[in-house]
Amino acid sequence: MTQPKHKVVIFLGPPGAGKGTQAERLAREHQLTKISTGDILRDHVSRGTDLGRQVKPILDAGQLVPDEILIALIRDRLAGMEPVRVIFDGFPRTLAQAQALDMLLEELGVPVSAVPLLEVPDELLVQRIVDRGRQAASAGQTPRADDTEAVARERQQVYREQTQPLIDYYSARGHLRSLDGVGSMDEVYNRVLQTLR
Ligand code: B4P
């Protein structure tokens, strides 16, 4: 089967829903480039760049980094990409970001392929994030500063206020594919594949 030239998959879902986990495997198995804004920002923080110093307190507090910064980062990532075969993990997170992404894709003449939405109950989300923090600490690694219960709850609140409106945005455009994000990573991955068929 020939693969479509361009592919743009946008993972939506609350913090800890498993966007990064699923996007990673999908990218690996389907020759797509994963663009994770969380990873890009954390990389800047760990390298101590100007941007990293600017965004560190925002990440640590579980708030969103200003739209202009994220939009510029994504514009840079997409520049010169041919064909455009990407999975967005963590972007867009606001309506302004979604509109900017639509404009960038329109300039490139590339349509959105699908927007899988991972649905997971709030308590399980907090549990996953807190578990990740504990596992990192017990493995002798430095846990993410935002992987604490208090910051996880703050991130849920930010999601509800600023990112949840994107569900209607992509639903109105016919791109949204809701799926159950509860179950083993393999089970969820199989559901992701079904939504993309
Ligand atoms: P992200 O890095 O996107 O953090 P996340 O929402 O926690 O990730 P995700 O939902 O992908 O969960 P994951 O797969 O890791 O953002 C961090 C911060 O960066 C934001 O708070 C913000 O400050 C900033 N930022 C990023 N993008 C931005 C933007 N566009 N605009 C403004 N600011 C932005 O999974 C979580 C845990 O669950 C893992 O431990 C995983 O192992 C586990 N898990 C996954 N699937 C599971 C399953 N099926 N069963 C059990 N556990 C599972």
Image (tube, rainbow, N blue to C red):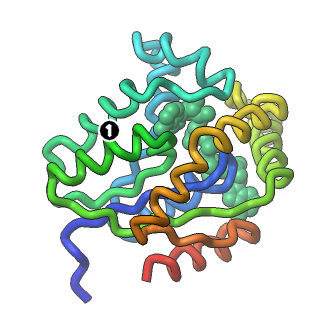
- Residue drawn where x is 52% and y is 72% of the image: 177
Location of residue 8 by image quarter:
bottom left
On the image, the x and y values in percent for residue 46 come to 51, 21
Q: Is residue 146 visible?
A: yes
- Residue drawn where x is 47% and y is 13% of the image: 48
Tell me the SS state at disc 1.
Answer: helix
Of residues 44 and 67, the one drawn nearer to the viewer in this rendering: 67
- Quadrant holding the N terminus: bottom left
- Residue drawn where x is 45% and y is 23% of the image: 44
* Horizontal relation, residue 32 to residue 19: left or right: left
Q: In the figure, 23 relative to 62: above or below?
A: below
Q: In the figure, 16 relative to 55: above or below?
A: below
Of residues 129 and 172, the one drawn nearer to the viewer in this rendering: 172
Q: Splitting the image into four quadrants, where does ligand 1 fall?
A: top right
* Horizontal relation, residue 42 to residue 158: left or right: left
**Which residue reaches farthest bottom?**
1
Of residues 135 and 93, the one drawn nearer to the viewer in this rendering: 93
Location of residue 190 by image quarter:
bottom right
Of residues 34 and 90, the one drawn nearer to the viewer in this rendering: 90
Please give the residue where the numbered disc 1 appears in the rendered image.
74
Disc 1 residue type (three-letter): Ile
On the image, the x and y values in percent for residue 6 come to 23, 66
- Residue drawn where x is 44% and y is 33% of the image: 40
On the image, the x and y values in percent for residue 110 come to 21, 60
On the image, the x and y values in percent for residue 97 come to 40, 40
